Image: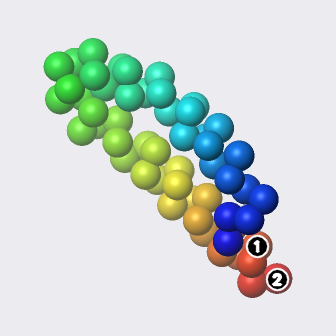
Amino acid sequence: MTTGQKADLFVLDLSFIGWYCLGALCCRIGIIFVLPYPQATKAEVYLTLRDFVKI
């Protein structure tokens, strides 16, 4: 499903570095509040790619 999309997914992962740093600022407890954002984004990417593959 990710054929031709790997670079885009890598850039997407890099875009969350700021969020991870922000969560780490709060003695790593803040990461609990930050982790749902990248996970939800990756879930949406999966749904989009899944629909694209069905075509």
What colour-coding does the image apply? rainbow
Residue under label 2, please give it: 55
| Residue 35 relative to residue 53: left or right | left
**Vertical side of 14 occupied by 27: above or below:** above
Q: Amino acid at mark 2?
A: Ile
Place of residue 46 in the rendered image (x, y in percent of width and height, measured from the top left): 58, 65
| Residue 16 relative to residue 3: left or right | left
Place of residue 23 in the rendered image (x, y in percent of width and height, measured from the top left): 31, 25
Place of residue 1 in the rendered image (x, y in percent of width and height, measured from the top left): 67, 71
Q: Which residue, as the protein is rendered here, is positioned at the far top?
A: 25
Give SS at disc 1. Answer: helix
Q: Quadrant of residue 14?
A: top right
**Vertical side of 44 occupied by 1: above or below:** below
Q: Which residue, as the protein is rendered here, is positioned at the far bottom?
A: 54
- In this rendering, the count of numbered labels is 2
Within 10 Å of the Cα at label 1, are there few (<14), some (14-19), or many (20+) other Cα atoms? Answer: few
Q: Which quarter of the figure is the C terminus placed in?
A: bottom right
Real-space Cα distance between discs 2 and 1? 6 Å
Q: Amino acid at mark 1?
A: Phe
**Residues marked 2 and 1 touching at CB (< 8 Å):** yes
Residue under label 1, please give it: 52
Residue at point 73%, 56% (across, down):
5
